[in-house]
Amino acid sequence: MRICAAENYEDMCRKAAERIAALVVTEPDCVLGLATGSTPVGIYDLLSRWCAGGHVSFSRVSTVNLDEYLGLEGTHPQSYRYYMEHNLFRNVDICPGHTHLPDGTASDLASECLRYDELIASLGGIRLLLLGLGHNGHIGFNEPGDVFVPGTHVVELEESTVRANSRLFDSADEVPRRAVTMGMRDIMGARSVLLAVSGAGKAEAVARAFSGPVTPRVPASILQLHPDVTLVADKAALSLLTAGREDLFK
Ligand code: F6R
């Protein structure tokens, strides 16, 4: 794992966006795996501006998102499809048919999970996967559990995740309790992973993910086994991981 240390949230976003843009410029047909949430908002904003300025084009890029709430149509303002449209897709020159998220309204969810796995395989897998990190160590919506689940699957969200995400809803009661998420096979199968983290509130999760054992109790810890992970994080998020661990920066 490489650490790319940033001063603050803005710096973290710039460093992450630069890595994504550099890949898109050099490999215009690439497949990007994408996350939602608060962390990537500034990253998507920069990519949108660079695209508008003619510095990068997404016209040949395909995207696969990590997850989607169950039961929310793509037009629902809290759905991840809506988030992606507003934060990135409608601001760049990406082909709408090249943007993919799991369908959280599918009547047959087992088939939908299989379809999503097959879709990712048919695209040739993910070239670069942008991840955020949950306070409980989740990546995508792979919540802490007894096993790492390989394929796309339906999850019950932890109460702490529902609480964390309720900031975006009018009340916690409105937050869906279930979601569809990409599993660990596609996450670990991504050729490179960019884990973006910001803020002191995530410092403990970062430390548990990278200085503790690899365990499904801390889903992000599986990234210790990935050959090409870059942790792009600000100093606050790195504070517990890097104390006395200068070796991590080598
Ligand atoms: C969202 C996702 C989640 C978030 C994580 C951090 O698509 O995959 O794993 O990345 O919950 O969320 P924020 O960035 O809101 O703290």
Image: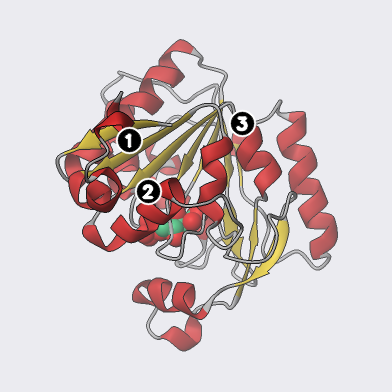
Q: Is mark 1 within 8 Å of ligand 1?
A: no
CA gap between label 3 and label 2 equals 21 Å
At label 3, which amino acid type do we have?
Ile
Q: Nearer the viewer, mark 3 or mark 2?
A: 3
User: Foreground residue, 141 or 55?
Assistant: 141
Which numbered circle lies on residue 48?
1
At label 1, which amino acid type do we have?
Ser
Residue 156 at x, y percent in the picture? 64, 74
Q: How many marks?
A: 3
CA gap between label 3 and label 1 equals 21 Å
- The secondary element bearing badge 1 is classed as helix
Q: Residue at x 68, y 58 (%)?
A: 103
Residue marked by disc 2: 87
- Mark 1 or mark 3, which is nearer the start of the sequence? 1
Image quadrant of ligand 1?
bottom left
Q: Is residue 233 at least partly visible in the picture?
A: yes
Residue 80 at x, y percent in the picture? 51, 58
Q: Is residue 13 left or right of residue 176?
A: left
Q: Residue at x 36, y 47 (%)?
A: 40
Residue marked by disc 3: 126
User: Foreground residue, 189 or 47?
Assistant: 189
Indicate the quadrant containing the N terminus: top left, top right, bottom left or bottom right.
top left
Q: Is mark 2 within 8 Å of ligand 1?
A: no
- The secondary element bearing badge 3 is classed as loop
- The secondary element bearing badge 2 is classed as helix
Neighbourhood count class around disc 1 (C-alpha, 10 Å): few under 14, some 14–19, many 20 upward = many
Q: Is residue 202 above or below residue 54?
A: below
- Mark 2 or mark 3, which is nearer the start of the sequence? 2
Q: Is residue 203 left or right of residue 63?
A: left
